[in-house]
Amino acid sequence: MFTTLIARTTALVAVLALGLGAASAETTQEKGLRIAQQVGQEPGFRDQAAQGEMILTTRNGQTSTRRFEARSVETGPDEGRSVLTFLWPGDIRNTALLTHSHAGGQDDDQWLYLPAVSKVRRITSSGRSGSFVGSEFAYEDMVDQDSDKYDFNWVQTAPCPAGGSCDVIDRFPKGSSAYSFERVWIDQARHLIQKVEYYDRREAHLKTMVVSGYRQHQGKYWRASRMEMSNHLTGKGTTLTWDNFRFNQGVNPNDLTVNSLRKGL
């Protein structure tokens, strides 16, 4: 009888544990959100600066190169300001994109300074899908991809483009967007984005960005050195290369404003 009681008790505990496990199991939406929130988790910094090149490639393989510098500064939890300014060649020199990032799922604000006409143009919500200075990057691709601006769904585990294992998640923009969803490969080792596929409003595969050349700076900050965007509709491509990252250089947020754009930053 004692043996029977132990067996029944053990069976009951197993059933209860199974029920608890089922009740506490993650949904694919919860898992997708959890993985997305792990991206970019690193020691904080107040500001950063970098230099780079934008390489435009035509359908026929012809290329043209532009050089730029970028600065950003944190202004609050999940909020910040950034500016990307072109340095070369002369026909695009001093053209600048200013972005004010907001927390809480609020759309970011963006302005483009056009030195040829000495005007600052605000990028409207409907204009965020437009091409950034003729590249395959849209204006909305140039803002922070904060997790509170998307809904998520975990899809599968798959090989990363650069090796290793990635979690593949879909993210669905909450605000206005040219994309119905984006499929993102995030490596399981360091929680860094390796690839993003962009799907248009008809859910057709429009573009793919491959992110590579990650390097750790100051033993803290992982940054990619290469972002390759391919447009499957036009056959064109744009590559951003990044170099010379500096952190906590004393960037003043008051220098990253619309008035500063008008004054030439």
Image (cartoon, rainbow, N blue to C red):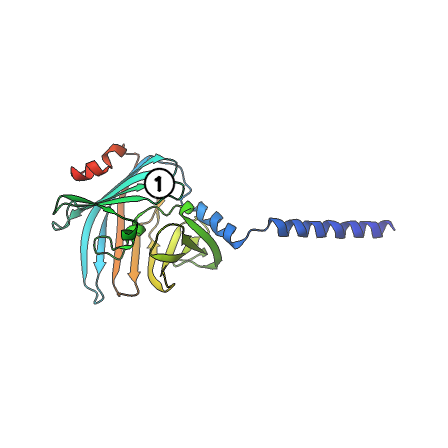
Is 42 left or right of 67, judged from the image as shown? Answer: right
Label 1 residue SS: loop
Residue type at mark 1 is His
- 235 in relation to 52, above or below: below
- Viewer-nearest residue: 230 or 234: 234
Q: Give the class, few, some or many, for how many residues have Cα within 10 Å of label 1's Cα (few <14, many ≥20).
A: many
Is 254 left or right of 15, judged from the image as shown? Answer: left
Number of numbered markers? 1
User: Where residue 124 sits: x, y (%)?
Assistant: 27, 48
Asked where in the image residue 249 lies, by quadrant, the reply is top left
Outermost residue to the bottom: 60
- 208 in relation to 150, above or below: below
Residue at 24%, 37% in the rendered image: 257
User: Where residue 146 sits: x, y (%)?
Assistant: 39, 45
User: Where residue 153 sits: x, y (%)?
Assistant: 47, 55
User: Where residue 210 sits: x, y (%)?
Assistant: 34, 57
Q: Quadrant of the C terminus?
A: top left
Q: Name the residue under label 1.
A: 102
Residue 71 is at least partly visible in this image: yes
- 200 in relation to 7, above or below: below
- Viewer-nearest residue: 52 or 13: 13
Residue at 75%, 53% in the rendered image: 11
